[in-house]
Image (cartoon, rainbow, N blue to C red):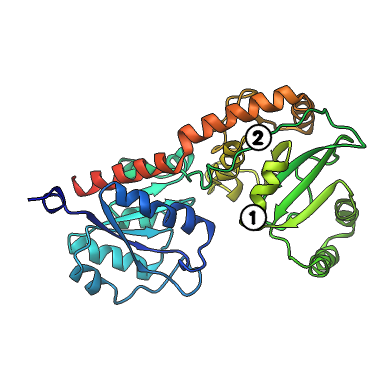
Amino acid sequence: MTDDAMHPPIKVGFVLLSPSRAPIPSTRIAVLNMFPLLREAGFAPHIVFEPEQGSQTPNVDGLLPELVAQRYDVIVFQKVHGASVEALAHGLREAGIKTVFALCDVVDVPMAQATDMTVIVTDYLKSLYPAALQHKIRVVHDGIEHPEVIKQDWGSHRGSAAAPLRAVLVTSAEMLRLPVLPALPPWLEVTIVGRYAASPLARLRSARWTYQQLPRHQRLPLLRFLFNRRIRCVPWHPERVYDAMREADIGIIPIERMPVHAPGTPAPDWKVKSENRLTMKMAIGLPVIATPIPSYEPAVQQGVNAYLAETPADWLACLKSLRDPAARAAMGQAARESALRRYSMQEQARLLSTALKELVGK
């Protein structure tokens, strides 16, 4: 008898948050990129449900008989919830099929209660769940998606008004102001890669609409941002975003930590973000300065592989230290080494496969 016959693959079905033909980043990074690595680890991953368009509350009524008939070992719910999903989770449990609420950047106590295991992306998120659920929560980070992209040159100049250093900021938003940094030093320019329209005319229309919605006292800062020649806003593109990071001298992640997290209230969005934007830049070899948030703090050795900076004065001090080409190179190399060691896709697949095997008792 062959090893495969003695130990058949663990059959895992995934209920996706977004369609596989046009996946959002979390579906691509946390699920689809994992499939080849899960197969190597002894799993047979399958997509058992995907919406026509991204939805956190899909209707999965009627799916239970098919999953039971196909004898799945585990069903993974990728960040989906709601009455229909919870009902399916309860039905699968009654049928003896293990369930996982997985790869999430949210706190959803009902789904954690309805499933056998919850997999989330940061230790901080785990700490937000009730004590009674801690025993069935595991942490699997967002893995580095393109480790082959490497920065080779950190430059040989300190920046000047005539030849400024280049900073890059990658965001999922249409950013129309720079948080924390009210004014750039004269030797620095910034490229923001974000959710901007490809057409300059469309970007102008969007900015005009935003301008008209703002109170009068906020309009002048927007105009200063829009007409600042040392700030360039470009639309996100899956390949060009890596070119922008590789060509930059410094990576920046300024975050406006508002609203303030009041005791006894749910954590605001800024506080539960994953470390992906930080580790992506670090893995390329960029020296990075970021606002401290819970997911970033464990990844940073201050002044060694990155900087965390709170106030505008802190930011300016860190930026000035990275005018030194040798400092940029040393930090960039340390950043890449530490990010790939802890946040590689292979390491996250190992953590996920270990959790799933533990769940099914193999």
Q: Amino acid at mark 1?
A: Ser
Q: Nearer the viewer, residue 173 or 82?
A: 173
Residue 120: x percent and y percent? 42, 47
Q: Nearer the viewer, residue 300 or 283?
A: 283
50 left or right of 241 in image: left
**Circle 1 — which element?**
loop
Quadrant in the picture for residue 311: top right
Report if the CB atoms under discs 2 and 1 are less than 8 Å apart: no
Q: Is 263 above or below relative to 12? A: above
**Residue denoted by label 1:** 172
Q: Nearer the viewer, mark 2 or mark 1?
A: 2
Percent of width and height locating residue 186: 89, 36
**Label 2 sits on residue:** 152
Give the residue type at disc 2. Gln
Q: CA distance from mark 2 to mark 1?
A: 26 Å
The percent coordinates of residue 154 (x first, y second) are: 71, 32
User: Label 2's element?
Assistant: loop
Out of 310 and 195, give the one closest to the viewer: 195
How packed mark 2 is, by other alpha carbons closer than 10 Å (few <14, some 14-19, many 20 or more), is: some
Residue, far bottom: 62
Residue 73, image x and y in percent?
22, 57
| Residue 152 visible from this viewpoint | yes
Count of numbered labels shown in the rendering: 2
